[in-house]
Amino acid sequence: MTEQFSPSLLPVTLLTGFLGSGKTTLINYLLENNRDEKVIIIENEFGPVNVDSNLLNVTTDIQIVEMTNGCICCTVQGELTDALHKLHEQKITGKLQFDRLIIETTGLADPAPIIQTFFIDDLIRETVQLDAIITLVDAQHILQHLDEHRVALSQIGFADRIILTKTDSIDEPQKTKVLNRIHNINNKAIIFEAINGQIPKSQWIDIHAFDLSDELTINKGFFVINPNKKLSADFKPLPLQKQTISWNDNICSYLFEAGDLDIKKIGTFMETLVEQYGNDMLRYKGVLAIKDNPQRLIVQGVHKVVGFDYGSPWSASSERVSRLVIISRTLPFDELNQAFLQTIAD
């Protein structure tokens, strides 16, 4: 995670979302309107059980179907690691040609083990770059899904971008309720609305979400994508502490803020935080101001995999604010916030 995006690495987008959220519709729209590159689509459940067919699969089975536009649909039953190894071998030997990869998970899949694949396997880490996690949300049914299926929480919690579908089936008060609940779970992801599955490629492809960049997105609002309208923001979520929380989601967003920090103290804080709570921390990113250092310190992690790097200089002393966003299962926030504030430089 400490490496910046390299054009020599194969970019991969992980597309997730609960059953019926519109993933296939979104992919079809992309393929119909993206003729300048070859995309390989990996579909199906990863692991020993194929949820779609309830058949036991003990080995990786890859079925390749080339589409009329030159893209490839790849159905994988079994382990994702083995599948990516085989696809890499076919690519370097010239048997397959493709420019990017999109992994479409089944609606019942938790993204966590899939994401970890990109950081624990040496070959995959050296040849593939995870670009972003995109989660589709069925606006009509998501409140019920969140109440009944914990995997829906995880899918939203891991997201870098959230695409809201089926908004034509709900009224404005219901949409506001949906948006506020999503925002409580993940206040880092930008939320877009897709009209009939139509959303520009630029809004969910080549996001570079896993680069160690200076940008820390918080509360940027809700954007409507409509072919007949310009991009517009029509929802400004309330600050988390001012919301009336009537649900009991065990995944939510935490924001830590302070001024200049002591490098040794914040290092110890992050080491302890990741060691004690890393298994519960889905995603986290910080842009930190370090005393006597003109550059921003960037930190980003998934569970216990974390990267640090220095970014661009602060342009003015008034901008030097340290912010750390953690999307996690329930944390002792008050206790951790006090520990975070203890890292402020003397």
Image (spheres, rainbow, N blue to C red):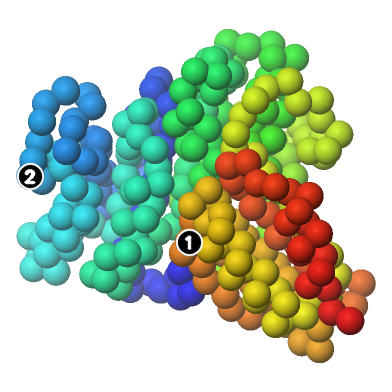
- Image coords of residue 8 (percent x, y): 33, 73
Left or right, 20 with reference to 124: right
Q: Position of residue 1 (x, y in %)?
A: 46, 69
Question: Which element is circle 2 on?
Answer: loop
* 345 vs 254: above or below: below
Residue at the image position 40 percent from the left and 46 percent from the top? 112
Q: Look at 39% across and 38% down and name the residue there.
A: 110
Which quarter of the rendering shows the C terminus? bottom right
- Give percent across and percent down for residue 135: 48, 37
Looking at the image, can residue 27 be seen? no
* Observer-nearest of 78 and 226: 78
Mark-to-mark CA distance, 2 and 1: 29 Å
Tag 2 and tag 1, C-beta contact below 8 Å: no
Q: Nearer the viewer, residue 283 or 190?
A: 283
Q: Amino acid at mark 1?
A: Lys
Task: Return the residue nearer the eye: 65 or 139.
Answer: 139
Name the front one of labels 2 and 1: 1
Kind of residue at disc 2? Thr
Rendered view: 175 above or below 311: above
Residue found 18% across the figure and 32% down from its top: 49
Determine which residue is flagged by label 1.
Answer: 304
In the picture of the structure, the residue carrying the numbered disc 2 is: 59
Q: Residues within 10 Å of mark 2 (few under 14, many from 20)?
A: few
Nearest to N terminus: mark 2 or mark 1: 2
The picture quadrant where one finds residue 257 is bottom right
The relative height of residue 40 versus residue 301 in the rendered view (above or below) is above
Which element type, helix, strand or loop, lies under badge 1? loop
Q: Residues within 10 Å of mark 1 (few under 14, many from 20)?
A: some
Q: Say left or right for 312 vs 50.
A: right
Q: Position of residue 19 (x, y in %)?
A: 39, 22
**Residue 258 seen:** yes
